[in-house]
Amino acid sequence: MKLTRQNYQSKWRIRPDGFDKVTGSLKYLTDYSFPNMLFGKVLRSSFQHAKIRSIDTEDAEQLDGVVAVITYKDVPGLNRFGLIFPDQPVLCEDIVRYVGDAVAAVAAKSEEIAEKALSLIKVEYVPLEVMDSPEKALSNSSIPLHPEGNVLHRASYKSSEQVLIELDNCPYVVEDTYETPRQMHAYMETEGGVVVPEEEGKITVYAATQHGFKDRMQLARILAIPESDIRVISSPIGGSFGGKDELNIQPYAALLALKTNQPVKLHNKRTESVRAGIKRHPMKIEMKTGANEDGKLVGHYVRIIADTGAYATLGPAVLDFAVEHATGPYIIPHVDVEGVSVFTNNGVAGEYRGFGGNQVTFALETQIERLADLMKIDSIQFREMNIRNPDDTGPLGQRIVKNNGAKSVLNMIKSSAVLLDTPKKNPFSVTGKGVALTMHGGGLGYGRPDPSGARLSLNKDGQIEIAFGFEEFGQGLIASIEIMMTEALNCSKEDVKIVIGDTDLVPTSGSSTASRSTNMIWNGIQKLKGPFMNKVLDLVADFTNTTRELLYVGENGIWRKGKRNQFVLSYRELANYVDLSQLTFQTQFHFPTTPDPVIGGHYLYSFAAVAAEVEIDLITGRVKVTKMDHAVAAGPVVNPLGYLGQIEGGAVMGLGFTLYEDSVMENARYQTENFDSYLIPTIKDIPKETNVYVDESLMEGDVFGPRGVGEIGTVAIAPAITAAIYQACGIWVKKLPVSSEEILDALAIHSFAKKLTGGV
C-alpha cells in the first residue's frame, strides 16, 4: 500500500512536539540556564599523535573569571570512557592519539573567559609518527597506538572452504574494490548540556544522549560516586543519528561542576563537534562475486577494512554488522567474508544510522548490478532468481523469524513509475534509472545485552502514565507512543502522560538505537495493557457495585456497555478513590534474539528496495536525483507520518553519503571543520517526486510486532543512485561520494563510443 494521508487517515496524527519545534519555542538541553552557572571549555590536542611532556595550567588558573581548571589529575575515578571498551581518556595523561583528544578543561564566568583560559594552558608535546590510514597502521613498520596493537576487532563468516575454487569455475565473475566516506552526523544541535551539582555530592546531567542509563554508569566510574547519585535528563535532543550514543561533554561538565559546586554548561561549537565527534566508518571493501550459466549466485568473497580512528566506541559491533550483511537478502552457497577494524590517528568512527550496512550494501548491490549487466539480463530478474525464501536461514546461517519481505519489496519496486516511465529528453543532460535491495537486522544481536522495560500506571492526576527509558531526538518517538497507547487502551491522547528521558523517572529500556525503540515500546505496552485494564475494571466494579463484564476502559474513563453506553467513572475520580500502587505495573524483557549462538547475529529483519532516477549535467558532471521511490517491509505501520518521515529523511542522508558528504582527512587532520566546506543536501538537492510503499504483513508465527524503520531508509540509497549513473553514462562508481570529474570523463568516453558504433 502507498503510504499517504488518505490511506492512513485514522492514524495520521500531528506530532505532539511538532508545534514547539517548528516555532522554535521548544527548549533543548543546551538551552537550559541556571543561577550562578559557569561556562566550560575543553582544550583538545593540537597534534594527531604525540607524547605529553608537561601540562602547565598556572596562567589559566590566575586569569580573572576562571573558577576551575582540571587535568587528568582531577579525575577521581576511572580516567577512561567507552560504551563497550573504556579505552578513551577523559583527559589525556601521557599521550594523545587524535586531534580531538581532551587534555584539560576550564570553567569560567563567561565563554569568552573560558576560551582565553584555554589559550593560556601550556602543553609540551613530543610528536610521534602518525598512522593516517589503516594500511599504514597494519604495516610491519607501524607504531602500536594501543597496548594490544592497531587491530581493534576482526570478524568473519565462512560457509564454505571452496569459495575461491568455485569462483574460478564461474563463467560470470565481478571483482573490484569499493570505498566509502567518513560521513558527519550533521545534527542541528551540537553536543552540549548542563551539569548541576545537588545536595550530598549528587548531580543532575542535562545532556543529549541516546542511552541515559549507560551514561550514568560511565559517569559513576569516572566520578567515583554511586550511580544512584547521578540523574541523567536526556530529552529532547536536536538530532543524533547515533552520534550522541557515546559520552561527549558529560564527563568534563560533571568534573567541573563537582569541583566548583556550581552548574556548568558546556556546548561544543561546530568546529569542536567536527574534531571530537564520532563519524561513519570509512570502509574499503574488496568483493569477488560469481554466478553460473543459469544466473544463480555461486560464490562471494569479501574483505573489509574499516578505519575506526583512535578509539573503539562501537567499532567492533559496526564491523560485525557489515560482515553479517555482506550477502544481503541473497542465497549464495559459497561465502567467505572477513573484516578488520583498525586503529589509526584519524577521527573516531562509531555508531551511525545504518551501522555498517550502508557501506557493505553499496558494494554488494553494485556487484549484483554488474553481474546482471555482464550476463545481459534484467537486474531485478537476476535478484528474483537469487533472493532468499521465507524459510531460509539468516546471512550467518542462524535461524531467523520467517519473513517474505525481500520478495515483497522487490515486487513492489518493480512496479514503480520511476522505473517504468519514460524520462523527458534534455539536450543538456542525460538520464538514468537504477534499483537496489537491502535487508537490515534490528536490535543489537545475539550475545549482546539488549534488555528493555516499561512501566504503566495511573498517576495521582488521573492520567494513564507510560514510562520508558528511551529518548526523543527527532525520530517521532513521542507521537508513536501516543498512537500505540490510545490504540491499546482505547483511550484519548489527553488521557495519556508519556514519561521518557529521565533516569530518575523511568525504567531501564536500553538504548534508543539499532532500530529497536518502536518494537520495544510496542512489546512493552502489549505486555502491560492486559494486567492494567483488568485491575482497573476489578476496582471500578467493586467500587460501583457493577458487574465487571459490563465495564470497559475507554476515553476519559470507564464505561458501561449497553444500548447507549453509559459513562461510569473518570480516571481522575478513580485516582482519588484507590491506592495507586495497585495500578502500577512494570515489565522487563529482552529484544528477540536468534536461538543459535552466532555472536551479533540478528533475528528480526526489515527489508527495503529503492528505485532512483538521476539527471546528469553534460557540462558540469553534476548528478541530481530527480525521482525516488521506496518499498519497505517492516511489519505494521504504527505512526504513518513518522514512518514516512524516517524513510524520506533517511533517504536524504543516504543521498548525502552518495553524492556530497566526506569529512576529508589529510595527515589525520580534518580538512572540513564546518558546514561552509562540508556539503550536505539542501531542499534543492532532493527529489521532488518520491513515494513510499509498505508491506505490513507478518507471516504466521511472527508475534513480534512492528520493526523500527529509523535506519533502513538510508541503506540502499547509494547503490540505487550509482546504478542509475551507470545507465546514464556507462560508469560503475566504486568510490563515494561520486566524483563529477569521473562522471565527465565517463560521459566523454561514452559519447566517443557511441560515435564509433554509429549511436548504438
Image: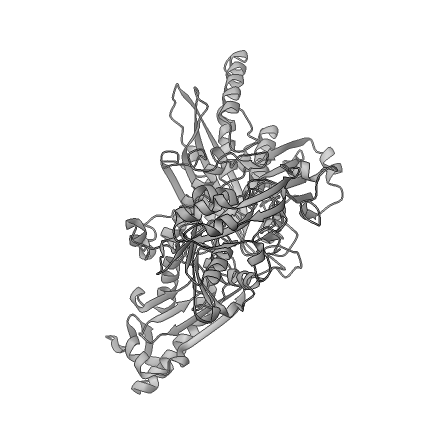
Residue 83, image quadrant:
bottom right
Task: Determine whether, in the image, residue 751 is placed left or right of residue 28.
Answer: right
Q: Quadrant of residue 580?
A: bottom left
Q: Residue at x 61, y 30 (%)?
A: 375
**208 on left or right of 221:** left
Q: Nearer the viewer, residue 399 or 292?
A: 399
537 and 674: which one is in front?
674
Q: Is residue 530 above or below residue 514?
A: below
- Relative to 445, 477 lies left or right: left
From the top left corner, tell me how far across and down residue 93 is, in percent: 61, 51
Residue closer to the observer: 230 or 511: 230
- What residue sits 44% from the left and 75% below the top? 585
Q: Is residue 292 visible?
A: yes
Up-down relation of residue 603 to residue 675 (above or below): below
Q: Nearer the viewer, residue 449 or 673?
A: 673
Q: Position of residue 356 (x, y in %)?
A: 57, 45
Q: Quadrant of residue 302?
A: top right
Residue 379 lies, with reference to residue 493, above or below; the image says above
How does the figure colour the protein chain or chains? one colour
Q: Is residue 560 visible?
A: no
Position of 214 compared to 175: left or right?
A: left
- Give the image location of residue 330, x and y in percent: 60, 44
How many numbered circles does the render carry? 0
Residue 625 x/y as whole percent: 42, 33
